[in-house]
Image: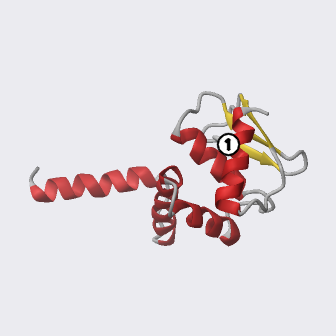
Amino acid sequence: MSELTEMFDGFNREYFGGRLPRYRVRLAALTAEGILGHCDGRRRLIRLRRGLEGDGIRGALLHEMCHVGVSGHGPRFMRRLHRIARHEPAVATECRYRRVWELLRRCGGTGDPMLFVLGLLEAEVARRGL
């Protein structure tokens, strides 16, 4: 059994009560920008971007595990992700980023949420004269 599959099994027990079906986990050359993983329910296979390590692997694997039986990033997916984020720093960062993006979208903004946050930080630094 691969180290990644063992990690899947451990996360399944810890965060999903062992209820997820067994998936194989492999590193792959994912070429689409911003894509760190993909969950293929038909093949029961999770592919993670080659080159990830540490928290990157943990966060991407847990993200893809939240997709098991759930397509897209709707409410059910987000409930799973937020539940895990309470205990897993690698996932908590993604949840904060998604909340900012959702706030930006609701306000009619577009673009990268990180640029939005950086703009807010720059404005605060300028306001304080730092």
Q: Residue furthest left?
A: 129
- Using the image as rendered, state which of residue 87 and residue 31 is in the foreground: 87
The quarter of the displayed image where residue 38 is located = top right
> Given the image, on which type of amino acid does mark 1 rest?
Met
- Using the image as rendered, state which of residue 24 and residue 43 is in the foreground: 24
Q: Residue at horizontal 68%, vertical 67%?
A: 74
- Using the image as rendered, state which of residue 20 and residue 130 is in the foreground: 20
Q: Residue at horizontal 64%, vertical 51%?
A: 62
> Is 112 rendered above or below residue 36?
below
Q: Quadrant of the N terminus?
A: top right
> Is 80 rendered above or below residue 114?
below
- Using the image as rendered, state which of residue 34 and residue 94 is in the foreground: 94
Q: Residues within 10 Å of mark 1 (few under 14, many from 20)?
A: some
- SS of the residue at dot 1? helix
* Rendered location of residue 130, percent (x, y): 11, 50
| 57 with respect to 31 (left or right) | left
* Rendered location of residue 102, percent (x, y): 52, 66
> Is 107 rendered above or below residue 54?
below
Q: Residue at horizontal 46%, vertical 60%?
A: 96
- How many marks the image carries: the answer is 1
- Display colour scheme: secondary structure
| 108 with respect to 58 (left or right) | left
Which residue in the protein does label 1 denote? 7
Q: Residue at horizontal 73%, vertical 30%?
A: 28
* Rendered location of residue 36, percent (x, y): 63, 40
The quarter of the displayed image where residue 68 is located = bottom right
